Image (cartoon, rainbow, N blue to C red):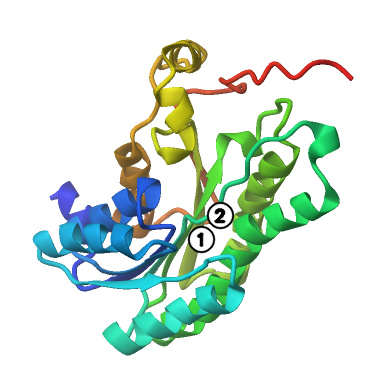
Amino acid sequence: MILDRFRIDGQVAIVTGAGRGIGAASALALAQCGADVVISSRTASDLDAVAGAVEAVGRRAVTVACDLMDLDAVSALAGVAQREFGRIDVVVNNVGGTIPLPFLDTTVEYLEEAFHFNVATAHALNLAAVPTMLAHDGGSIINISSVMGRVAGRGFAAYGSTKAAMAHYTRLVSKDLAPRIRVNAIAAGSTATSALEIVMTTPVLKQMMEDMTPLHRIGDVEDIAAGVVYLASPAGSFMTGKVLEIDGGTDAPNLDFQLPDY
């Protein structure tokens, strides 16, 4: 049965930024397909809610509330998975995000912080997790990038640059870790998460974004989670070094900040 290829029974996944949004949906989707999960974000109450949903489908969730800007805290997640479950099969580097800013407001410090949060955190976790993954059956690393890593728009110098870096990091590291660990990314389009709360609650902005998306809707977190399951499971076992675009067909920014010419 083709659906059996999407099962990951008995595997262990680490998901960062898993308190809500794409991370929470991905952790739950992986659990529904048979995995136990280590989930982390800053807010313990958010994690507890996700853990409850995971346990409701018969899998185990271990929560780690911490500041994921702290590279030592991110790296420690691999040790938690090893201690609690004895293995790591899937890593989902979901934590990240940077607020768009006009060019002259994008300081060097802001750019460095964006790279730290969006790229260095993923590398820190991968470095810590890979030895355990190699000690068992290998596995799958999934990095969450963005459509803004390949399209150009005003205000996105920091965010877009880091997401482009994440996409190419994926291609490069896939060569380092082949054939036992597959490394892929998802370039997510506009998705209904807390990051888009202002858009989702402002009818004019929401309509603009929908109109400028070829499929005329904003993505659901489950759209991205389905891609995570595909890349984590045997269904995606012949993919590595690729960026899966789940973006509603977007080929240009679908939200205009109306930043004026300098």
Left or right of 112 in this view: 76? left
Decide: marks 1, 2 in contact (CB < 8 A)? yes
The residue at 63%/53% (across/down) is 166
**Residue 52's image quarter?**
bottom left
Q: Observer-nearest residue: 9 or 143? A: 143
- Across and down, in percent, residue 179 comes to 50, 70
Residue tagged by mark 1?
A: 183
Report the quarter where the C terminus lies: top right
**Residue 202's image quarter?**
top left
N-terminal label among 1 and 2: 1
The residue at 57%/64% (across/down) is 122
Could you classify mark 2 by the number of other residues whose Cα lies within 10 Å: few (under 14), some (14-19), or many (20 or more)?
A: many
- Across and down, in percent, residue 151 comes to 66, 29
Q: Observer-nearest residue: 37 or 184? A: 37
The amino acid sitting under disc 2 is Gly
Could you classify mark 1 by the number of other residues whose Cα lies within 10 Å: few (under 14), some (14-19), or many (20 or more)?
A: many
Left or right of 33 in this view: 130? right
**Residue 51's image quarter?**
bottom left
Left or right of 47 in this view: 17? right
- Across and down, in percent, residue 2 comes to 18, 48
On residue 118, which mark appears? none
Q: Observer-nearest residue: 132 or 210? A: 210
On residue 241, which mark appears? 2
